[in-house]
Image (cartoon, rainbow, N blue to C red):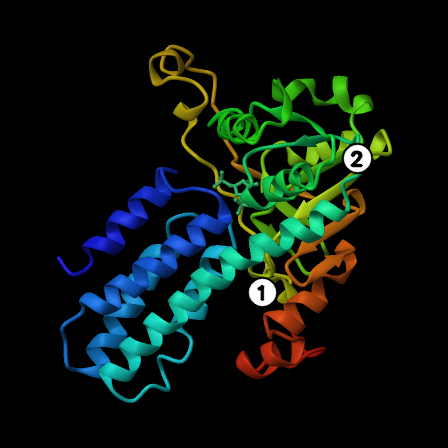
Amino acid sequence: MKLMIVTETAEKIKSMEIRGAGRIARTAADALRLHATALTTGDLDTFRGEMEAAAQVLIATRPTAVSLPNAVHLVMAGLKHETTVKEARDGVIRRASRFMESSQEAVGKIARIGARHIRDGDVILTHCNSEAALSCIIEAHRNGKNIEVFATEVRPRNQGLVTIRTLNAAGIRTNFIVDSAVRSFINDVDLVIVGADAVTVNGAVVNKIGTSQVAHSAHEARVNVLVAAETYKFAPRTILGELISIEERPGNEVLPDEIAQTLKNVTVRNPAFDITPAEYIDLIVTEEGAIPPQMAYIIIKEYLGWGIEEFHNAFEINLGHEE
Ligand code: RI2
């Protein structure tokens, strides 16, 4: 009963009713805030245990967007030092509220910084539906720049529809294309702008499946690729060489079960994300400024507070003496 808000939120994240790396993170933080508010126990250990269980349920929903565990850890940080239930509850509420607010502010800052990299007359291509990426495009349009957009369809979940509705409402001239048409139009494009679900320490960007093909085409055509990503999308554990796991979603998102069942030799594969190497990315725009992808470690260390030495201490890793 007490976990209701958490399980409901988790279901909505899993089914993608709530989607987009930033929104997933804010919604998870909010669910923890509401959960802490609803917990009636007077026992600190029970409170901590209930919060930890809720955090695990939320983190387990989707494996790729690092914004989710980063947000959950931010909200839960401090819980082990708080000494009464009231202090712990107030702490969770304060940290969750601060995260939700700063996450929303970050998108506004990214919009202002990203818009500076868009020139009057630019034709921009975007893939999937990223609040951070669209905010840059809309800000440039608001600044009076005459821009035009190519937006992909984004099979199989069609997030491109959300993108074109937003661009249309903003009054931006938009071309809607199927995913496989990117290379046919790339020579008409001046700049690619996409979002991110995760950024690794070596500057690789994990984003909606197809992003690496878009970036590859752009690289071949010498079109710049800009990634709009809040700092909480950077993945601290990649410092340890940990890989980002790529979510594979049900095959029936791609091919209806009635058809798939008649094709006994066919397996439908449906990875939701892919990885674009740093060499295909020109700039990552964060709320702290625009950086080349090779500087990702600075964001992880300076803004998320995770340096290699923290990992060294936290996990007692004897660097250089690993088996
Ligand atoms: P914002 C989305 O994932 C897309 O891959 C998008 O580029 C990324 O999150 C970032 O979105 P999904 O939830 O946080 O649609 O910029 O699988 O909105």
Distance from the alpha carbon under mark 2 to that under mark 1 = 39 Å
Would you name the residue on which mark 2 appears? Answer: 120
User: CB of mark 2 within 8 Å of CB of mark 1?
Assistant: no
Ligand 1 within 8 Å of the CB at mark 2:
no
Would you name the residue on which mark 1 appears? Answer: 237
Total tally of numbered discs in the picture: 2
Quadrant that contains the C terminus: bottom right
Label 2 or label 1, whichever lies nearer to me, is 2
x, y (%) of residue 127?
62, 32
The part of the image, by quadrant, that contains residue 180 is top right
Q: Is residue 277 visible?
A: no
x, y (%) of residue 203?
72, 55
Quadrant that contains the N terminus: bottom left
Q: Secondary structure at mark 2?
A: loop
Mark 2 neighbour density, 10 Å: few (under 14) some (14–19) many (20 or more):
some
Q: Residue at the spot x=44%, y=68% of the render?
A: 98
Q: Secondary structure at mark 1?
A: helix
Q: Is residue 151 above or below residue 32?
A: above
Q: Is residue 264 above or below residue 88?
A: above
x, y (%) of residue 282?
80, 47
The amino acid pointed to by label 2 is: Asp
Mark 1 neighbour density, 10 Å: few (under 14) some (14–19) many (20 or more):
some
Q: Is residue 8 visible?
A: yes
On screen, residue 51 versus residue 183, left or right, reads left
